[in-house]
Image (cartoon, grey):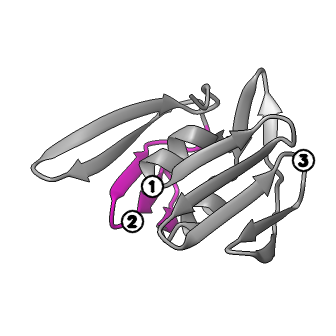
Amino acid sequence: MVPLRAIFEALGADVNWDAATQTVTGTKGATIVKLTIGSTIAYVSGQAVPLDVPGKILNGRTLVPLRFISESLGAEVVYDNSRITIRSGDATFVSPDPTVGVKVHFIRRLGRRNLHRTAKRGGHPD
């Protein structure tokens, strides 16, 4: 589980949070990902997708499933014994140890310069 705003924006998606319905909507090109907190069903471009783990709010932080969000937005997620790597056309993310509360570095390529963002796992979505 990762902060919703950090993962959506790092993958190049626009994100909208509806506090009244506790629903997050991410849009990237023609792909629209909708997830309601506590639900085991999400939607990708209108198609229902079952979730292994629902999104949740923990200590005022909105957390969403990393693999589901990443793959829904066209990224590749690779787990090995010591890290998680997420690759997309927009960015590469690497977590040195997915089992502890480490910082995950988001690197987005913007022309000739890189924008580096860091979000502590379990951190605030904004």
Whether residues under marks 2 and 3 lie with C-beta atoms below 8 angstroms apart, the answer is: no
Asked if residue 2 lies left or right of residue 80, the reply is right
Q: In the rendered structure, does residue 123 fall within the stretch colored magenta? A: no
Percent across and percent down for residue 78 are 49, 65
Q: Give the CA separation, mark 2 to mark 3.
A: 27 Å
* Residue indicated by mark 2: 88
Question: Is the residue marked by circle 3 packed among few (<14), some (14-19), or many (20+) residues within 10 Å?
Answer: few
Whichever of labels 2 and 1 marks the residue nearer the N terminus, that label is 1
Q: Please name the residue that numbered disc 1 is placed on.
A: 11
Residue topped by disc 3: 38
Task: Mark 1: give few (<14), some (14-19) or many (20+) Cα within 10 Å.
Answer: many
| Quarter residue 118 falls in | top left
How far apart are the two marked residues, 3 and 1, measured between alpha carbons? 23 Å
Mark in front: 2 vs 1:
1
**Extent of the magenta region:** 76-99
Q: Earlier in the sequence, mark 2 or mark 3?
A: 3
Disc 2 is placed on an element classified as loop
Q: Amino acid at mark 1?
A: Leu
Place of residue 40 in the rendered image (x, y in percent of width and height, measured from the top left):
88, 60
Nearer-the-camera pick, 116 or 23: 23
What residue sits 45% from the left and 55% below the top?
11
Q: Pinpoint residue 55: horizontal percent, then vertical percent.
A: 79, 47
Q: Quadrant of the C terminus?
A: top right
